[in-house]
Image: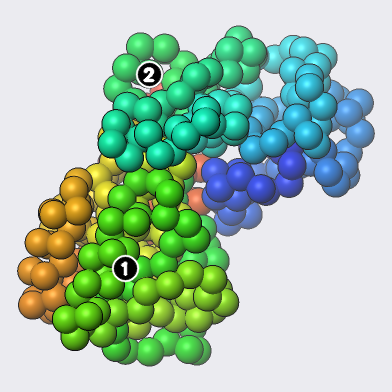
Amino acid sequence: MKIIAIFPNGLKDTIARLISDGFDNTKNVDLIRYDYLNKKYTEEEIINHSKNANYIFVFWCKYQHQFAGQNYPHDLLDKINKPEITVYVDGSEYNCTGHPSPNQGKLSKTDPSKCKGEPWIDEKMYERCKWYFKRETYEEDLERKKIIPLLVGAESSFFKENGNWWKEKEYDIFCSFGHTTTGLREETQEICLKLKDEGFNNIIGSGFPYKQYMDYIIQSHIGVSAWGAGNSCRRMWEIMSNKTCCFVQKKQILFPNIFEDGVSYVEYSTPEEFESKARHYLKNKDKCIEIGKNGYEHIKKYHTGTKRLEYMLKVMEGSDWRTALD
């Protein structure tokens, strides 16, 4: 299978990294990468390759116009002129531009509907593709026939549990956010501090070196995730990839092969629910261990980069997105 993958800005976007990881770990794919920052091929060579390509993947990226010009990638796609095999991978969050409205993150804390901003769909790309895979997909988005849910997932680099620095569980809760301005990050962090003051062995903070950050995840019974930009957060995948019980702010967006509350992760929708469940599971740490292992197995089965690419290809071949990997 021959696939052209057009990246505007290397792998700056989470979805772009994940699907690239899938390409790297999938056999029988002849991949032609076209990166605007590191052009291995000329535009003419890409157009020539497109003549016998099976698919053309085009990736969104934050601040893409800064790197690729205002007409990225429309001019190139118009020259190729093969919308019937073109796949757009929209990794955007608050809206399709990567530039949220003023205070959009803050407003969405109390009104989750504000997570969905305008413009929501890149209409120029919608015209130029057959499949529009979108990271943040709501039920009403499915009224547009090309739109298909594509949640972020676990990159290969997240899986550290078999590394030579593996340690047993030592801490109760690990809570680390780069910022606390979105979702319930500030609220959950305050609850973790409250529990620490009561004597629980919690690690709370930010700016840890990445190896130490991952070490804390592995050594904790519970890791905390909350919405970042939109309903998604990388922490969820880092935590679950290492057999740690993940507390996840409940999502509104759609995705297939979802996790089960109390089985493969723990959901919460309010600060009060977070605190209640944290106290419950800290009294039942064997259950935390069980949920951590279940989450890990579920990720390996459905939510790695390889599985995301497999999911996309099956949907493109005609499978329903809800059951493509079943």
Q: How many labels sit on residues?
A: 2
Instruction: Give the x, y percent position of residue 6.
Output: 72, 34
Which element type, helix, strand or loop, lies under badge 1?
Answer: strand
Circle 1 Cα neighbour tier, 10 Å, few/some/many (<14 / 14–19 / ≥20):
many
Q: Is residue 184 left or right of residue 96?
A: left
Q: Is residue 51 left or right of residue 235?
A: right
| Mark 2 or 1, closer to the camera | 1
Q: Amino acid at mark 2?
A: Asp
Q: Is residue 78 above or below residue 305?
A: above
Comes first in the chain, label 2 or label 1:
2
* Label of residue 223 in the image: 1
Quarter the N terminus occupies = top right
Q: Are marks 2 and 1 in contact (CB under 8 Å)?
A: no
The residue where tag 2 is placed is 141
Which element type, helix, strand or loop, lies under badge 2?
Answer: helix
Q: Is residue 290 above or below residue 96?
A: below
Residue 295 at least partly seen: no
Q: Is residue 275 above or below residue 120?
A: below
Q: Is residue 248 above or below residue 223?
A: above
Q: Amino acid at mark 1?
A: Gly
